[in-house]
Image (tube, rainbow, N blue to C red):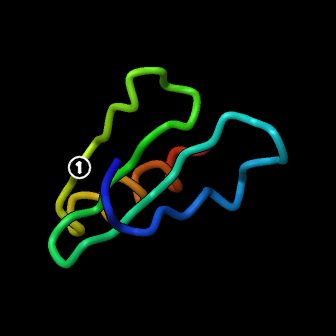
């Protein structure tokens, strides 16, 4: 895992699988707590913002 502080999603309940986010100066990192490979998705902050806006816009 990265040496940056990870924040758990505010939508995550107690004991559930959760998305964790860490930010560096130039990158946003995401990981899933239940992923056994501990894979990390990294994105530029502007790209991450675009993703969040698209997800919020297309909620069902």
Q: Quadrant of residue 3?
A: bottom left
Query: Which residue was labeled with disc 1?
Result: 42
Q: Quadrant of residue 44?
A: bottom left
Judge left or right: residue 54 versus residue 12: left
Q: Quadrant of residue 23?
A: bottom left
Question: Residue at horizontal 19%, vertical 78%?
Answer: 25
Q: Position of residue 38 (x, y in %)?
A: 40, 31
Which quarter of the rendering shows the C terminus? top right
Judge left or right: residue 45 versus residue 10: left
Q: Position of residue 28 (x, y in %)?
A: 29, 61
Q: Residue furthest right?
A: 14
Q: Which of 11 and 34 lies nearest the eye of the viewer? A: 34
- For label 1, the SS is strand
Q: Identify whether 50 is placed above or below 60.
A: below
Q: Identify whether 11 is placed above or below 3.
A: above
Question: Residue at horizontal 31%, vertical 40%?
Answer: 40
Question: Residue at horizontal 21%, vertical 68%?
Answer: 46
Q: Position of residue 43 (x, y in %)?
A: 21, 54
Q: Identify whether 27 is placed above or below 1.
A: below
Q: Residue furthest bottom?
A: 25
């Amino acid at each position: 895992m990265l040496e940056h502080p990870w924040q758990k999603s505010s939508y995550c309940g107690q004991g559930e699988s959760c998305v964790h986010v860490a930010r560096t100066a130039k990158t946003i990192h995401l990981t899933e707590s239940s992923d056994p490979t501990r894979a990390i998705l990294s994105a530029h902050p502007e790209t991450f913002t675009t993703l969040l806006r698209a997800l919020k816009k297309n909620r069902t």
